[in-house]
Amino acid sequence: MVRAMEDLSALGKLLLLTGGLLAALGLLLLAFEKLPLVGRLPGDIVIKRDGFVFYFPIVTMLLLSLIATLLLNWLLRR
């Protein structure tokens, strides 16, 4: 019975952590909307047709991936 309560406690902590990370990600996405160049860089693909828009921000994703890689390498080498 005690083991089951420990498992529920761990699950609760995991759910709180996941929710916090999702909230932080949501705030980041809202902040990126306000930045002038994010999502509108040269090389981002936008196809507009009647009643249809296809948007593929490939250059923006490459840039964000590079920044995240450099940041994580810097943080994890400490």
Image (spheres, helix red, strand yellow):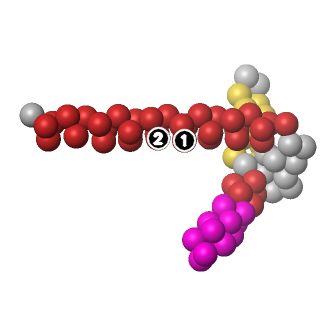
> Which quarter of the rendered picture does the C terminus lie within?
bottom right
Local secondary structure at mark 1 = helix
Q: Is residue 41 above or below residue 3?
A: below
Task: Identify the residue at image location x=85%, y=52%.
Answer: 41
Q: Which residues are magenta?
A: 65-78
Is 77 one of the magenta-colored residues? yes
Local secondary structure at mark 2 = helix
Asked if labels 1 and 2 touch by Cβ distance under 8 angstroms, the answer is yes
Q: Is residue 32 visible?
A: yes
The one of 17 and 48 positioned closer to us in this rendering: 17
Is 67 one of the magenta-colored residues? yes
> Which quarter of the rendered picture does the N terminus lie within?
top left
In the picture of the structure, the residue carrying the numbered disc 2 is 17
Q: Is residue 58 visible?
A: no
The three-letter amino acid code for the residue at tag 2 is: Leu
The 10 Å Cα crowd at callout 1, few under 14, some 14 to 19, many 20 or more, is few
Where residue 3 sits: x, y (%)?
A: 14, 41
Where residue 64 sits: x, y (%)?
A: 71, 57
Task: Identify the residue at image location x=72%, y=63%.
Answer: 67
The three-letter amino acid code for the residue at tag 1 is: Leu
Task: Identify the residue at image location x=54%, y=37%.
Answer: 20
The rendered magenta stretch, by its main secondary structure, is classed as helix
In the picture of the structure, the residue carrying the numbered disc 1 is 21
Q: Is residue 20 left or right of residue 65?
A: left
Where residue 47 sits: x, y (%)?
A: 76, 40
Residue 15, quarter of the rendered image: top left
Give the label on residue 52, or none.
none
The one of 75 and 67 positioned closer to us in this rendering: 75
- For the residues marked 2 and 1, what is the alpha-carbon distance in whole angstroms? 6 Å
